[in-house]
Amino acid sequence: MENKKIRVAIAGVGNCASALLQGIELYSRDEELKKDPIGLMHYDLGGYKPEDIEIVAAFDIDARKVGKPLKEALFAKPNCTKVFYPHLPDYPVTVQMGPVLDGFSEHMKDYPEDQTFVLADAEPVDVVQVLKDSRAEILINYLPVGSEEAARFYADACLKAGVGFINAMPVFIASDPEWAERFRRRGLPIIGDDVKSQVGATITHRVLTKLFEDRGVKITRTYQLNFGGNTDFLNMLNRSRLKSKKKSKTQAVQSEMKIPMVDNDIHIGPSDYVPWLKDNKVCMIRMEGLGFGKVPMELELRLSVEDSPNSAGVIIDAIRCMKLALDRKLSGPLYEISAYTMKSPPIQFTDAEARKMVEEFIRGEDYKLDFTLAARTMAGEAGK
């Protein structure tokens, strides 16, 4: 390989970034995990391993992170994810001030500082120039839910700097035909939108929905309620920031149904903030259906996960798949990778189909995806 290292920049040095970098170091250094990589879907992905990921730039807006060494910022408040690998190296990266735009919700000021964001009193840097100077190849967008304007700012910065974009949050960029075309014309790959955790609420709900559908059971009503204690859940107490998040999670489940449910019969979305849960996320799923003879059945499930490591277990693959795309000079949305790793990809596939296509992509095999259908879908002529 011409360039073995994968040069990554991060927008938002929160819990997800902390879990990702802890994981990169853990899987790079633990000899037992190299033999039996528990928690990884791929240890070696197309020739790239966790130790090949190098963080070269980081942006945030919190006073306890901006201007600080990246190692220090990853464990600074309000980060509260589980520390499973504290021995991080002294990265040669200082966290720089990004633009605030809509990345901060005013209601956060009403909570204790160790639970919420504290805006830094600093001028934003020239993000495009930093990306160029750092020679970043990929930018991961980890901004808070509801940061629509800020997410598009970073996407635009990637286009200007010549950097691939992984959109891990629920703002529709990769799945927006105009943005997709901009990345295609610029010769850059994009993965998005809204990361689908390793085994989280969305993929669990999708699998159960597919099970009901495949076994002939008609789903009549369903809900998914989520609550946790990290800044993501605190941020989402501002319900005005939830439009994209609810749409993303709902369409991820609806896409497994032959006939979508009416709004009154399906409720999927964040529910509440419980501070002492910290980065633990609890999900409650209920499904009601009609089986043989139209006889009713019910399913209830409770899932408890550490939210940010659950996300990092997917992003570490998305990074390496994007590097393969850069190596192969692919551009525009990476449909298969997005369907596998994101809740709202440009085209929805079943998780089994997406996994198969990703394995083919990694091996460099010819795609089985109908790109004519892909183009029509992106143009809004075919449904997801």
Image: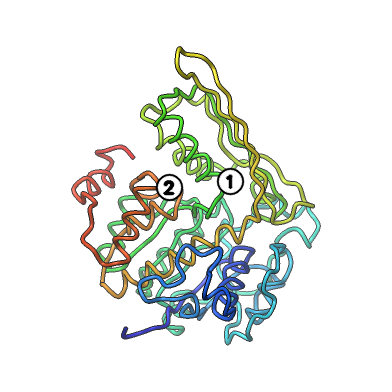
Judging depth in this view, the residue of 124 and 69 nearest the camera is 69
Tell me the amino acid under the disc marked 1: Arg
Q: Is residue 298 left or right of residue 131?
A: right
Tell me the amino acid under the disc marked 2: Ser
Q: Is residue 318 left or right of residue 297?
A: left
From the viewer's perspective, is residue 324 above or below residue 355? below
Q: Residue at x 58, y 66 (%)?
A: 12
Residue at numbered disc 1: 241
Q: Residue at x 66, y 56 (%)?
A: 306
From the top left corner, tell me how far across and down residue 156 is, in percent.
Answer: 40, 65
Q: CA distance from mark 2 to mark 1?
A: 17 Å
From the top left corner, tell me how far across and down residue 4 is, in percent.
Answer: 39, 83
Q: Nearer the viewer, mark 2 or mark 1?
A: 2
Judging depth in this view, the residue of 115 and 111 nearest the camera is 115
From the viewer's perspective, is residue 144 above or below residue 251? below
Judging depth in this view, the residue of 348 and 45 nearest the camera is 45
Crowding around mark 1 (Cα neighbors within 10 Å: few <14, some 14 to 19, many 20+) is: some
